[in-house]
Amino acid sequence: MTLLIQWAVTSSVLILIVLAVRFLLRDRLSARLKYALWGVVLLRLLVPFQVELPAAVGQALPVLASNLAPEVADVELYALRTNSRPLSEDSLAEMRESGIDAGAVLGTQAPIYTFGNLEVEGHTTCRVLSDTGIDTYFFYTTLPRLLMTLWAVGALCAMAVIFCSNRRFLGRLKYYRHALEGVDAPIPVYTAAHLPSPCLFGVLRPAVYLTPGAAEDAATLRHVLAHELTHYAHRDHLWSLLRCLALALHWYNPLVWLAVGLSKGDGELACDEGAVARLGEVERIPYGRTLVDMVAARSLRPGDLLSCSTAMTGGKKSIQQRVAQIVKKPETLKTALFAVIAVVALSAVFVFAEREEPVRNLYGSYRYQVSHTQAVQFSPSLLSSQAYPDAITDPDLLEKALDILDSAADLLNTPEELGLDLSEAPFLSPRVTLLEDTDGSADGHTYLLYTHRLGGSLERCYLVTPAEIGAESYTVAAVLDPSTPGALELLARTQRHRIEEDLTQVTGNVGLSFSDLTPGKEQVKEQTFIVQEVLSDISYSLTYESPVLTLDFGLRTADGTEVVCRTAYGGVANGTFEGISAGSYQIFVRNMGDLNYYTQLPTYQPESGRDNATGAVNFQIIE
């Protein structure tokens, strides 16, 4: 909605600037220069976006037109419950034990808006935990949606009217037209009965259409062709289409209707100048007489603004203006040209450029950082006794962490508008650091995960930067679900446990259980088997179902090199691996069914599961 308002305000300001230039320099500008001024307006009418100026430049300029656009507040906020999914008592109890109480927002990805003391997602659904289950709500507001819908419906209706009127005009032209022979022109030339004025019409296949009277007189035909072919050289058939599109997009703005009408008139004046230049100075007065002889029966009407065709003649007033312009033959002064260029340049800056806000939006940068993160470092608050020195790097844990961080939503309100005191955030908040590598060679991007209670049981987790104590100011980069700190800490704790398990020396029975291991497949224990003595003896014990199966088992290094391997038959194997060198090993077991005779037996049925191995292998270092 804000973009639409800025679009309307800046377009109106630019139209007023061009009108002022036309009025102040009316006697010093050529018709073609006046017509060219509308090109800047047309560009703004068709391009809704603005170019952002650097803050240093923007602060040195006066107030931009885009800053004049008022903010439209949402008058009323409605929450419509669209779905309710009950949960079992066990599920509800489990969620309460996890710290999720009734009223907590469970998930959404929409931007955050504030309405008084209430903070909600502004144009989406969100899931809220109730006393019986999970309720889904759809939040919507009245005024912005109403205005946007009204604008969209009006634009579609205007486009439909423009299309239908021009389609009907083309149908009439095709019905009455006849090709005019013996004319030297780069595009087709036709005569058409019941045509009020000669014109150029068509976008993909433009053509000149003449009245029968204009085609009968040689001098009139020469003047009319010079006029319409000048329109073609100026690409006015394309500019007419763009004007109609701008009119449809800004159907509500009377200044745009005025600009379209004036630009069509300036286009005819510019075409008269071009036609005289094409015919020669000796034809200036005769060309003016032709215009007088072809005065239309009526003046330009509002409906004519919807036409994509040119019109050589208009009412008596417009013809008088055009004849006076031809006779006067104004000269463009260098000072006037310089003034026009300066005004257009300043207009483009003040209307097209949008000043950068003093506090830069960090949401886009944060999302980019998440997309390039290779490891996530979680650190509890300074008041916590826990520590997680290792970053989350395991693929499955890292994927979950990035999914949590990627669900952040943009915050459209400043901390001051939200009533947040972020000075306490560095003391109470855990930290999350996004690392672009896993070896620590590059600095990461660190944020505070500041949880703020909104009232009752509702909480919100804000992503705050910088993550340091005593900063001059703190900025909220994004907003996350309140369960984010707990979820990330759980992942960091799991990563720590995995690393501790990998580094723990095996001194007791350590083994590997396997189930339904199909022929030709193997299973490997992720936990590393560490042998610290130079040469150690390791006893083993293997039991499994289906004694007809043959299994291989043993120890291998992380790169897949098998240090020791035994083959077991009959469902059981016991023994000792002697003289195992110090190092880290992995336990493996492999079903050798695809290499043995029973896979060739007629009774072999791989789908039955009878040839799958199920059992366990145990290892123990002999001290």
Image (cartoon, helix red, strand yellow):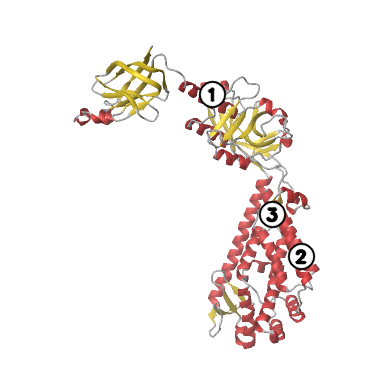
Towards the viewer: 253 or 334: 334
Label 3: state its secondary structure.
helix
Along the horizontal axis of the image, is 582 left or right of 364?
Answer: left
Residue 168 is labelled as: none
Label 1: state its secondary structure.
helix
Towards the viewer: 166 or 442: 442
Q: Looking at this rendering, what residue extends furthest in the top direction? A: 623
Identify the mark nearer the N-term, 2 or 1: 2
- Looking at the rendered structure, the kind of residue marked 3 is Trp
Towards the viewer: 69 or 573: 573
Residue 7 is labelled as: 3
Q: Report the residue marked by disc 1.
A: 493
In this picture, is 378 found above or below 201? above
Residue 40 appears at what percent x and percent y?
69, 63
Residue 111 appears at what percent x and percent y?
63, 40
Separation of residues labelled 3 and 2 (CA atoms): 18 Å
Separation of residues labelled 2 and 1 (CA atoms): 68 Å
Front position among marks 2 and 1: 1
Q: Name the quadrant containing residue 410.
A: top right
Towards the viewer: 356 or 469: 469
The quadrant of the rendering that contains the C terminus is: top left
In this picture, is 88 found above or below 230? above
Residue 19 is labelled as: 2
In this picture, is 118 found above or below 494? below
In the rendered image, is residue 217 in sight? no
